[in-house]
Image (cartoon, helix red, strand yellow):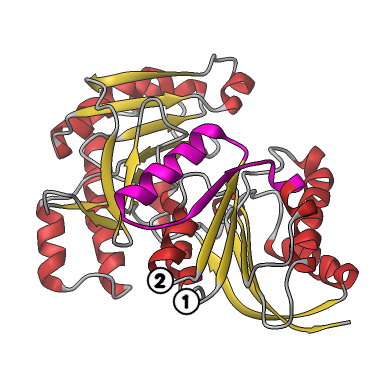
């Protein structure tokens, strides 16, 4: 995935990866995790990712050369020691690094040096604020691995401007894995009354508004997220209604004034033990959303937990449709961008699944 910055320069935003044998790196000791090894893998992964974009029809030969000359890291997935991972993200020349593995810590200097050598970033933000860190016996935290805090800045995606903050913002500042889904769902929005639930920075809401939706309502329980959505809307000259509200309560009391409802909640579960509780949560928002839609209405719903399979998620929606007395037709399926690769031997890498259905009959 790539963006054009406000200055017009292309920045590559795609997963940097190599062949499966090179991704599955089993290294028993950090001593063997050498600088030249890291450097060569990241460099070769960069070329492989560009080739993927080209074969996917996203870029032509001329643009490929331009991107290769000005490429920035998005995701580097290095798997070692029984499939532990390091993920790097970057919408600007300031890569973000996230790690959940205690054993990766001694390699940071090597990784930092490799990134600086290859990409000459202005800064590198180390975001170790995942709750999974505690399971590894490490405290969560955010720090600068290289350079200075870049502060808030603007990136462009899907012809829309977004303000992101790598250090103080949520996660890596912008959900890059959903950019494709924003565009896909927006294709259904023209002339429709749209409800975007769990809007975060307004990704779906802004895409639908730009696509010609008659009216867009965006809902999120976070005051910070709502403010970000309003700011992004104003920056793009788009008119959306942003409401700070608990989505479960909002759907319970909302009137059937929508033609397209989008559900993109945060993960409802972080482990298998709470999976069934999470599915009850999805069932509730599915049921309440379907009750608000008449014949011809559309529901786009997403799940970002790898613990819930696509089949389980679809069954959940089907059960909700029976209870809502609505017959649904599947019109589109969604997934993470190819810059977030799915490895067939690692099912958890296919974490994001999305479904768009149409109400074709009510009972």
Q: Is 244 situated left or right of 229 in this image? A: right
Choose top left, top right, bottom left or bottom right for residue 352: bottom right
Q: Is 208 situated left or right of 167 in this image? A: right
Is 222 above or below relative to 76? above
Q: Position of residue 37 (x, y in %)?
A: 26, 36
- Whether residue 329 is visible to the viewer of this picture, yes or no, is yes
Is there a contact, CB below 8 Å, between mark 2 and mark 1? yes
- Foreground: 299 or 244? 244
Q: Position of residue 135 (x, y in %)?
A: 64, 22
- Foreground: 95 or 156? 156
Identify the residue shown where x is 71% and y is 41%.
269
Identify the residue shown where x is 25% and y is 65%.
51
As helix, strand or loop, the secondary structure at mark 2 comes to loop
Q: Position of residue 194 (x, y in %)?
A: 57, 65
**Distance CA(mark 2)–CA(mark 1):** 6 Å
- Whether residue 180 is visible to the viewer of this picture, yes or no, is no
Q: Is residue 188 magenta?
A: no
Q: Is 1 situated left or right of 184 in this image? A: left
**Local crowd size for mark 1, using a 10 Å CA cut-off: few (<14), some (14–19), many (≥20):** some
Identify the residue shown where x is 12% and y is 54%.
8
Residue beneath label 2, please?
Answer: 211
Toward the bottom, the furthest residue is: 360
**Local crowd size for mark 2, using a 10 Å CA cut-off: few (<14), some (14–19), many (≥20):** some
Q: Is 9 situated left or right of 324 in this image? A: left
Choose top left, top right, bottom left or bottom right for residue 316: bottom right
The mark found on residue 141 in the picture is none
Choose top left, top right, bottom left or bottom right for residue 363: bottom right
Is 303 above or below relative to 101? below
As helix, strand or loop, the secondary structure at mark 1 comes to loop
Residue beneath label 1, please?
Answer: 190
Is 355 above or below relative to 108? below
Extent of the magenta region: 221-249
């Amino acid at each position: 995935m790539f963006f054009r910055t406000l200055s017009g320069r292309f920045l590559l935003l795609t997963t940097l990866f190599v062949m499966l044998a090179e991704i599955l790196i089993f290294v028993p000791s950090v001593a063997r995790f050498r600088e030249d090894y890291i450097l060569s893998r990241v460099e070769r992964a960069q070329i492989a990712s560009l080739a993927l974009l080209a074969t996917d029809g996203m870029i032509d030969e001329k643009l490929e050369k331009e991107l290769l000359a000005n490429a920035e890291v998005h995701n580097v997935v290095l798997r070692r020691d029984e499939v532990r991972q390091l993920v790097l993200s970057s919408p600007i020349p300031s890569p973000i690094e996230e790690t959940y593995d205690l054993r990766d810590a001694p390699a940071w200097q090597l990784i930092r040096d490799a990134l600086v050598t290859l990409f000459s970033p202005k800064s590198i933000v180390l975001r170790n604020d995942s709750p999974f860190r505690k399971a590894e016996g490490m405290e969560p935290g955010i720090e600068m691995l290289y350079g200075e805090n870049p502060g808030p800045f603007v990136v462009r995606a899907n012809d829309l401007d977004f303000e992101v903050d790598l250090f103080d913002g949520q996660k890596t500042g912008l959900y890059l894995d959903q950019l494709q889904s924003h565009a896909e769902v927006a294709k259904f929005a023209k002339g429709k009354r749209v409800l975007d639930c769990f809007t975060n920075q307004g990704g779906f809401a802004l895409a639908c508004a730009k696509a010609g939706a008659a009216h867009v309502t965006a809902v999120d329980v976070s005051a910070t997220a709502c403010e970000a959505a309003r700011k992004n809307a104003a920056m793009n000259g788009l008119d959306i209604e942003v409401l700070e509200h608990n989505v479960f309560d909002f759907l319970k009391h909302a009137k059937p004034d929508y033609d397209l409802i989008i559900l993109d909640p945060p993960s409802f579960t972080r482990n298998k033990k709470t999976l069934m509780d999470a599915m009850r949560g999805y069932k509730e928002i599915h049921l309440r959303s379907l009750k608000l839609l008449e014949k011809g209405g559309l529901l786009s719903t997403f799940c970002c937990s790898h613990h819930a399979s696509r089949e389980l998620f679809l069954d959940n929606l089907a059960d909700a449709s029976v209870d809502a007395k609505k017959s649904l037709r599947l019109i589109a399926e969604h997934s993470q961008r190819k810059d977030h690769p799915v490895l067939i031997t690692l099912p958890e890498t296919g974490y994001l699944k999305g479904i768009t259905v149409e109400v074709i009959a009510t009972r």
